Amino acid sequence: MAMTASHPQPTPTALPGPPTDELLHVVQFSGGIGSWATAMRIKAEYGTDRLVLLAADTKAEDPDLWRFVGDAAAHLGVTPVIVADGRTPWQVFADQRFIGNSRIAPCSRILKQKPCRDWLTANADPATTILYVGIDWSEQLRTPGIERGWKPWAVRFPMCEPPDLTKAQMLDWARAEGIEPPRAYANGFAHNNCFGACVRAGQQQWRHLLQVAPERFAAAEAEEEHLRDELGDVAILRERRNGVSRPLPLRELRRRATANAAPEHGPSAAAANRSA
């Protein structure tokens, strides 16, 4: 489906190489709204005859992510290519004897980048392939590192090209096309990955996860505690106190959050209710 007047076709970035009808267009189809918008722009520009939606299954995603991938792929008329290592992030951490964090996330490299690169190596000649990544103009500073990381394939970022769209506009665009966006956004998450329990996230997102999906927080806490038994005083999160950085386990984050919330349900709250 061509873009509507409210979502005009972007100005393409000129890339050297063979004629466009010989190019393979591979979209990193993460299940996020940006990757969907990217695929829509590429469909509008090149059609779908040589469009690939490449998705990596980390075995830790929200089932609704795969609902969205299926709905979006059906709307595009393209069957997604799904690759997988077969392990979960926590299994990777155990095998690596290292818990991922905001700075170093072996789960991303092993469960996403490597399976996708293996598929590209087997199926996509760098001389006739363009790889598309769904980050938008607000994250444009990341593009040089991504380009280096995916060499020898050329990489393009359609959502960094005009017209600039906000995430809210992309979500509205999906609804206008008859596709229900991933529920993660409605639940207050900025990204649709790892069921909200992403080790790259900071304390704020983990506190939010505890509030909106305590069962998911509890599952991550249990996994972290198991690895702490094996590896010692390590954690996804860190905090700095008196100039010293130290691990902040999810168990402790939960304890603090619960303690801060306790007065709302304690004796003073009960007394207030009786007097009301």
Image (cartoon, grey):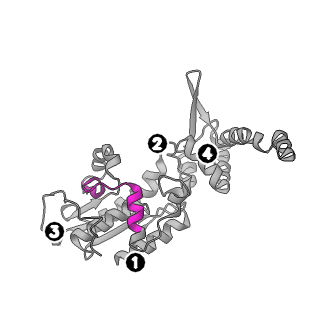
Using the numbered discs, state the Cα–Cα distance from disc 3 to disc 4 in whole angstroms.
47 Å
Task: Magenta stretch: give its range.
Answer: 152-174
- 54 with respect to 237 (left or right): left
Using the numbered discs, state the Cα–Cα distance from disc 4 to disc 1 in whole angstroms.
35 Å
Using the numbered discs, state the Cα–Cα distance from disc 2 to disc 1 in whole angstroms.
35 Å
Q: Can residue 271 be seen in this view?
A: yes
Q: Where is residue 233 in the image (x, y as percent from the top left)?
A: 64, 35
Using the numbered discs, state the Cα–Cα distance from disc 2 to disc 3 in whole angstroms.
37 Å
Amino acid on which disc 3 is placed: Thr
Q: What element carries label 2?
A: loop
Q: Which of marks 3 and 4 is in front?
A: 4
Q: Nearer the viewer, mark 2 or mark 1?
A: 1
| Residue position for label 2 | 104
Q: Where is residue 164 in the image (x, y as percent from the top left)?
A: 29, 54
Mark closest to the chain's N terminus, 4 or 1? 1
Question: Residue drawn at (49%, 64%), measured in percent from left and top?
Answer: 182
Q: Is residue 261 above or below residue 74?
A: above
| Residue position for label 3 | 20
Label 2 close to label 1 by CB (< 8 Å)? no
Amino acid on which disc 4 is placed: Arg
Mark closest to the chain's N terminus, 3 or 4? 3
Question: Residue drawn at (53%, 63%), measured in percent from left and top?
Answer: 183
Q: Is mark 3 on a helix, strand or loop?
A: helix
Using the numbered discs, state the Cα–Cα distance from disc 1 to disc 3 in whole angstroms.
24 Å
215 or 103: nearer the viewer: 215
219 or 39: nearer the viewer: 39
- Crowding at dot 4, Cα within 10 Å, few <14 / some 14-19 / many 20+, comes out as some
Say if the magenta span includes residue 42: no
